[in-house]
Amino acid sequence: MPQERRLNDNHEHYVVGPMGTPLTLRDLPSPNTKRWVVRRKAEVVAAVLGGLLSLNDALTQYRLTTEEFRAWQVAVDKWGMQGLRTTRIQSYRS
């Protein structure tokens, strides 16, 4: 579900991240991320849905395919952050 961007005390745009805390562009995972843990995937999804990062920018910056990002988004929408667990993905994809 899309959310509205807000401004923090440093005049940075933020959205509420997956852990319930403010998420700014500065807080996003490094573009060199090799290990995609649940929290990092959820942060990228939240940033795109909140308008901090465009889908095209996210795909380019993190070298993702559209299908991969959409799978993350669907998993979060249907099952929350737990849907992003790679060890559980087979159970959730039925």
Image: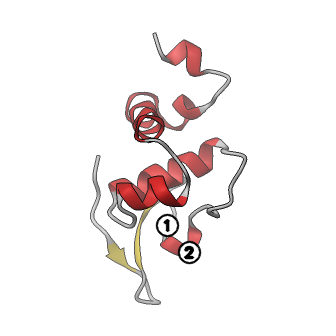
Dot 2 falls on a residue whose secondary structure is helix
Residue at screen point 39% across, 64% down = 53
Judging from the image, the colouring scheme is secondary structure
Q: Which mark is residue 23?
A: 1
Mark 1, Cα crowd under 10 Å, few <14 / some 14-19 / many 20+, is: many
Above or below for 1 versus 86? below
The answer to whether residue 36 is left or right of residue 9 is right
> Horizontal and vertical percent for residue 29?
61, 61
Q: Say which amino acid is labelled 2.
A: Arg
Q: Say which amino acid is labelled 1.
A: Leu
Dot 1 falls on a residue whose secondary structure is strand
Pair 2/1: label in front? 2
Residue at screen point 50% across, 17% down = 92
Could one spot residue 21 in this view of the protein? yes
Dots 2 and 1: beta carbons under 8 Å? no
Mark 2, Cα crowd under 10 Å, few <14 / some 14-19 / many 20+, is: few
Residue matched to label 2: 26
Above or below for 31 versus 13? above
In the image shown, does 71 or 82 lie closer to the viewer? Answer: 71
